[in-house]
Image (spheres, rainbow, N blue to C red):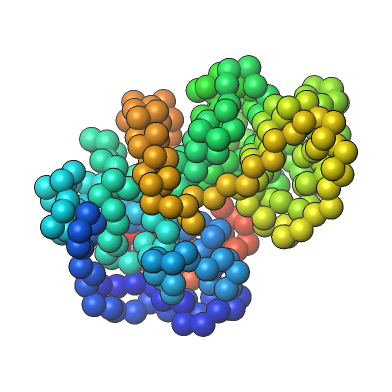
């Protein structure tokens, strides 16, 4: 099988090399999927640098967190699949490859009529956004939800979910073009963080202490401002740390506002928790995708052999939505 391998850690894109490796084998409750497309995530960039290693049991040198393809081998204990079904889902690593092996209940049927390109742009974005906002964040109708990096894969999925759940959305991004595109997906109060301070703008529009729920992939640089805009009993879902690993916090603010601060990631969770998150997505989100009420946002579709060019596009933060890689 063809796959992309991290030969050594570092920022150099040349450290990611396409190679041929032996075929994988599915055993027990696992299935092997012949991958037709995957997508790039920022976690892949961090893994190449040695800053976000894969958890135990996942491939350490082959990045990739999501896949679409068809079942082409069954472990001896598999009961959910017969073979040849089109499926998609998340993995803890290894989807930059023509084959992946995954637990049978972490694969979800691709809705009839959905293209591989669309399916490849869905799992990590919509499953993560649903798990963070709904399952853990308790998002409900009427909530005011602040979504940072709203033009990214998770952000654009979160925006659509907020609208479908009856919440009001505020979204931040770094360009007017990106904000214009996501505004076509669902209503939002758009804030260009390069032109205005999001804390000041939110307080101007909604008053102090107005936000119920925040989905933040930025981390340190936004920490104090996030706490400032949250209302009493507000919830902060920390989903990423793109701006750094540490931030000073006023514990008085956390105490007096009775804030809930929840760190969340899917990659390192136990299998049972991933299955629960996947099945919640399958029951609550997948029907909306199948009906066209939610849609993946695709920035570009690139042949796997042009992996370097696609990765560099994300490195430059030029993408709006997902960059899909096809085999």
Residue drawn at point x = 85 percent, y = 31 percent: 256
User: Residue furthest toward the bottom?
Assistant: 8
Image side of residue 275 versus residue 124, left or right = left
Image side of residue 316 versus residue 99, left or right = right
User: Does residue 288 sit above or below 260 in this rendering?
Assistant: above
The residue lying toward the viewer, choosing from 223 and 200, is 223
Q: Quadrant of the N terminus?
A: bottom left
The residue lying toward the viewer, choosing from 84 and 264, is 264
Asked if residue 260 can be seen in this view, the reply is: yes
Residue drawn at point x = 13 percent, y = 57 percent: 76
Q: Quadrant of the C terminus?
A: bottom left
Give the quarter of the image for residue 96. Answer: bottom left
User: Does residue 63 sit above or below 107 in this rendering?
Assistant: below
Residue 173, given in percent of the width and then of the height, sits at: 68, 43
Image side of residue 200 versus residue 6, left or right = right
User: Does residue 18 sit above or below 300 in this rendering?
Assistant: below
Residue 247, given in percent of the width and then of the height, sits at: 80, 54
Residue 145, given in percent of the width and then of the height, sits at: 66, 29
Residue drawn at point x = 43 percent, y = 74 percent: 61
Asked if residue 121 can be seen in this view, the reply is: no
Residue drawn at point x = 57 percent, y = 73 percent: 50
Query: How many discs mark residues in the rendered view?
Result: 0
Residue 111, given in percent of the width and then of the height, sits at: 27, 36
Image side of residue 311 versus residue 22, left or right = right
């Amino acid at each position: 099988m063809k796959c992309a391998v991290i030969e050594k850690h570092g920022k150099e894109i040349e450290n990611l090399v396409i190679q041929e490796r032996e075929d994988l084998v599915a055993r027990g409750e696992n299935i092997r999927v012949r991958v037709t497309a995957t997508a790039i995530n920022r976690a892949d960039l961090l893994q190449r640098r040695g800053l976000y290693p894969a958890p135990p049991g996942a491939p350490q040198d082959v990045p990739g967190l999501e896949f679409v393809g068809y079942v082409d081998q069954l472990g001896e204990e598999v009961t959910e699949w017969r073979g040849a079904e089109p499926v998609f889902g998340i993995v803890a690593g290894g989807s930059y490859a023509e084959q992946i092996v995954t637990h049978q209940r972490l694969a979800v049927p691709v809705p009839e009529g959905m293209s591989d390109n669309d399916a490849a742009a869905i799992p990590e974005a919509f499953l993560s956004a649903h798990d963070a906002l709904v399952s853990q964040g308790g998002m409900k109708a009427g909530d005011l939800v602040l979504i940072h990096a709203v033009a990214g894969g998770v952000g654009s999925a979160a925006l659509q979910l907020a609208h479908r759940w009856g919440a009001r959305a505020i979204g931040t991004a770094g360009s007017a073009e990106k904000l214009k595109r996501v505004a076509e997906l669902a209503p939002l109060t758009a804030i260009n963080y390069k032109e205005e301070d999001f804390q000041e703008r939110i307080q101007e529009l909604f008053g102090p202490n107005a936000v119920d729920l925040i989905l933040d992939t930025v981390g340190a640089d936004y920490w104090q401002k996030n706490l400032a805009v949250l209302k009493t009993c507000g919830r902060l879902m920390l989903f990423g740390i793109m701006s750094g690993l540490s931030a000073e916090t006023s514990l008085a603010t956390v105490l007096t506002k009775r804030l809930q601060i929840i760190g969340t990631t899917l990659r390192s969770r136990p299998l049972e928790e991933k299955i629960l998150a996947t099945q919640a997505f399958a029951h609550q989100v997948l029907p909306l995708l199948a009906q066209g009420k939610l849609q993946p946002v695709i920035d570009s579709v690139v042949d796997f052999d042009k992996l370097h060019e696609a990765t560099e596009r994300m490195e430059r933060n030029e993408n709006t939505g997902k960059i899909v890689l096809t085999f």
